[in-house]
Image (cartoon, rainbow, N blue to C red):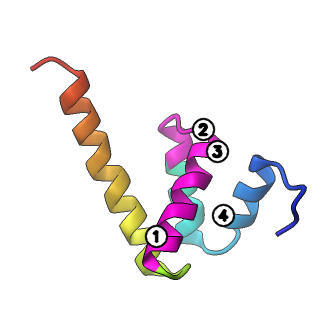
Amino acid sequence: MSIHQSPAERLITEAAKSPQTEAWISRQIMAGQKPSQILATLDRLCGKVGGDGAAGLTFACALVFVSTFAVLGWALPS
């Protein structure tokens, strides 16, 4: 990775790693996440899981899925 890549260029690089990663990044963008937030999540998750394979992506998807419901449950009145 080049030091001079913009967040958008870095997202494109990450998305090119696999169709699953591309789909996950696309879903995050459609959900309104900023590129810097998506990259921060990828960096954290790849560091914790220890790889750039399917396990890291599955963990990231599960984390985002659960956090969406947690935020909606907290932010929206019942």
Q: Secondary structure at mark 2?
A: loop
Residue drawn at (52%, 39%) of the image = 30
The amino acid sitting under disc 1 is Leu
Q: Position of residue 26 (x, y in %)?
A: 57, 51
Label 1 sits on residue = 57
Quote the CA–CA distance across marks 3 and 2: 5 Å
The residue where tag 3 is placed is: 36
Q: Which comes before the other along the chain, label 3 or label 4?
A: 4
Dot 1: few (<14), some (14–19), or many (≥20) neighbours within 10 Å? some
Instruction: Say which residue label 4 marks.
Output: 15
Residue 34, label in figure: 2
CA–CA distance in space, label 4 to label 2 = 15 Å
Magenta-highlighted residues? 28-49
**Residue 44 magenta-highlighted:** yes
Q: Residues within 10 Å of mark 2 (few under 14, many from 20)?
A: some
Under mark 4, the amino acid is: Ala
State which tag comes first along the sequence, 1 or 3. 3
